[in-house]
């Protein structure tokens, strides 16, 4: 009787694990890359890629240019490469901010200030990026605010040093990055296309 209960338990556990994996796959919350052990999910990558695509398509229309070049496979692949590179850079910057006391509050203050200054931001974001204001804050404003806070801190600590660019170059070389997508790899400094 005891062996039968164990078997039922392990079968139930296996089914539960399969259900969890299925939900993660369907919702896009599975990792496509790791930066220092922190995952970048397919959902995050697709959200950023779609916003970038919409932005470039809108910009082409505004400037009277054809967006036909945008949909060429090599251009879409390059845009996705740049998006993944930016997501990895954002994770490296977020890790760098952890050494700054009160950095999260400074980032929050910058965001509050930016959001108060623009009355038409919600409409502009929807027009340019095709996303809502909450997604814009998460995808664009928070990473930009983090970058600015880190840049400022590095400048204050050592104004004569190379500053943020030198720090980022070194941090990228030191980062442990694993990309799970077939088309891309990490060369120690940036995401590149596999040949």
Image (spheres, grey):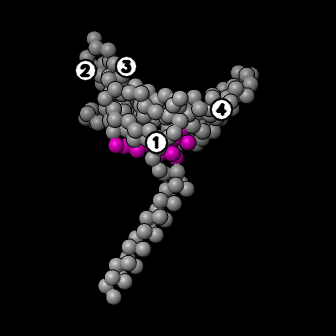
Q: Residues within 10 Å of mark 4 (few under 14, many from 20)?
A: few
Q: Which residue is mark 4?
A: 73
User: Residue 185 colored magenta?
Assistant: no
Q: Residues within 10 Å of mark 3 (few under 14, many from 20)?
A: few
- Where does the image place residue 29, in percent across and percent down from the top left? 48, 51
The Cα–Cα distance between marks 3 and 2, rounded to whole angstroms, is 14 Å
Circle 1 — which element? Answer: loop
Highlighted magenta segment, given as a residue range: 37-48
The Cα–Cα distance between marks 4 and 1, rounded to whole angstroms, is 20 Å
Residue at position x 46%, y 42% in the image: 180
Determine which of the numbered discs, if any, sits on residue 97 in the image: none
Q: Quadrant of residue 112?
A: top left
> In terms of sequence position, does the residue under pointer 3 or pointer 1 come before the other?
3
Front disc: 1 or 2: 1
Q: Which residue is mark 3?
A: 165
Circle 3 — which element? Answer: helix
- Where does the image place residue 146, in percent across and percent down from the top left? 39, 32
- Where does the image place residue 170, in percent across and percent down from the top left? 32, 23
Q: Which residue is mark 1?
A: 180
- Foreground of the two, 183 or 176: 183
The reply to whether dot 4 and dot 2 touch (C-beta < 8 Å) is no
* Screen quadrant of the N terminus: bottom left
Q: Is residue 1 left or right of residue 128?
A: left
Q: Which residue is mark 2?
A: 157
The reply to whether dot 4 and dot 3 touch (C-beta < 8 Å) is no
The Cα–Cα distance between marks 4 and 3, rounded to whole angstroms, is 31 Å
Q: Residues within 10 Å of mark 2 (few under 14, many from 20)?
A: few
Front disc: 3 or 2: 3
> In terms of sequence position, does the residue under pointer 1 or pointer 2 come before the other?
2
> In terms of sequence position, does the residue under pointer 4 or pointer 1 come before the other?
4
The reply to whether dot 3 and dot 1 touch (C-beta < 8 Å) is no
């Amino acid at each position: 009787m005891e062996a039968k209960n164990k078997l039922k338990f392990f079968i139930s556990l296996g089914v539960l694990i399969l259900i969890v994996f299925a939900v993660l796959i369907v919702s896009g919350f599975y990792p496509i890359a790791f930066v220092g052990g922190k995952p970048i999910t397919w959902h995050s990558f697709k959200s950023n890629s779609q916003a970038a695509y919409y932005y470039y398509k809108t910009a082409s229309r505004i400037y009277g240019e054809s967006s036909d070049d945008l949909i060429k496979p090599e251009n879409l692949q390059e845009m996705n490469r740049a998006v993944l590179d930016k997501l990895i850079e954002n994770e490296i910057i977020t890790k760098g901010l952890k050494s700054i006391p009160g950095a999260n509050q400074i980032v929050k203050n910058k965001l509050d200030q930016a959001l108060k200054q623009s009355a038409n931001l919600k409409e502009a974001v929807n027009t340019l990026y095709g996303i809502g204001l909450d997604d814009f804050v998460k995808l664009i404003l928070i990473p930009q605010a983090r970058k600015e806070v880190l840049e400022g801190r590095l400048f204050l600590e050592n104004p004569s040093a190379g500053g943020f660019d030198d720090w980022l170059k070194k941090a990228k070389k030191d980062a442990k990055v694993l990309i799970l997508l077939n088309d891309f790899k990490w060369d120690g400094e940036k995401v590149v296309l596999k040949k």
